[in-house]
Amino acid sequence: MTFDHTQFATALDNQSGVSISKSWFQWSDTSGDLNKTMEYKKGDYTYRTWYQETSVMNGDIGMFISCKIDFERTTGDDHIMLLTGFSRTPTGVGQNYTVEMKFAQASVQFHGSEDNNVLGVPVTSGDFGQGIYNSLSAILSEDFGDVDDTTAGRQTLPDIARMNVNAMIQSAS
């Protein structure tokens, strides 16, 4: 099982309203793949998705993928944390198989102490991207995070999580 970071960038860039300004660049004076990030805008807001970390299970039967997404704020970034799991399922034809998402979960870590961090419920079936959107939307009320003019920006977090999950699905094989 593999995860194609180049395909992820393409899939995210193809999402409605997303404009990638910098794709997989090394952060500051760091080194290594896990210190790479991609910067993009959706609407008036800027986000960074960090290079996904993957762990493949023995026998190539499953893969975990996790990543962090920054919502850039002038007073400090908020973070979406995504954890997803994929499994390899034989198609019944020769050695062929499909790779399918089996679960996804998101949490949001807010900068500062003005709001409590939140943990969405795990999504285990159906449209995983929409499930993540629904899970976070149920937690983030309309006036959530009304500090430093971030209410409208924080309301975009469920959509950003959904777009990243959908791009992950397109990038796992």
Image (cartoon, grey):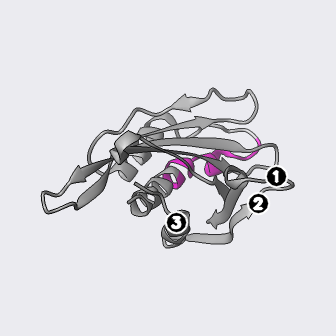
Q: Could you tell me the amino acid type at mark 3?
A: Leu
Outermost left residue: 92
Q: Are marks 1 and 2 in contact (CB under 8 Å)?
A: yes
Q: Are marks 3 and 2 in contact (CB under 8 Å)?
A: no
Q: Dot 3, crowdedness within 10 Å: few (<14), some or many (≥20)? A: many
Q: Dot 1, crowdedness within 10 Å: few (<14), some or many (≥20)? A: few
Q: Could you tell me the amino acid type at mark 2?
A: Gln
Residue name at image x 64 percent, y 70 percent? 20
In 3D space, how far apart are the residues under numbered discs 3 and 1 (Cα atoms)? 24 Å
Q: Are marks 3 and 1 in contact (CB under 8 Å)?
A: no
Magenta segment boundaries in residue numbering: 148-160
Residue at which label 1 appears: 30
Question: Which numbered disc, 3 or 2, marks the residue closer to the eye?
Answer: 2
Describe the element under mark 3 as helix, strand or loop: helix
| Left-right relation of 23 to 112 | left
In 3D space, how far apart are the residues under numbered discs 1 and 2 (Cα atoms)? 7 Å
Relative to 49, say whether 79 is above or below.
above
Residue name at image x 69 percent, y 46 percent? 150
Question: Which numbered disc, 3 or 1, marks the residue closer to the eye?
Answer: 1
Describe the element under mark 1 as helix, strand or loop: loop
In 3D space, how far apart are the residues under numbered discs 3 and 2 (Cα atoms)? 19 Å
Quarter of the rendering occupied by the C terminus: bottom left
| Left-right relation of 61 to 107 | left
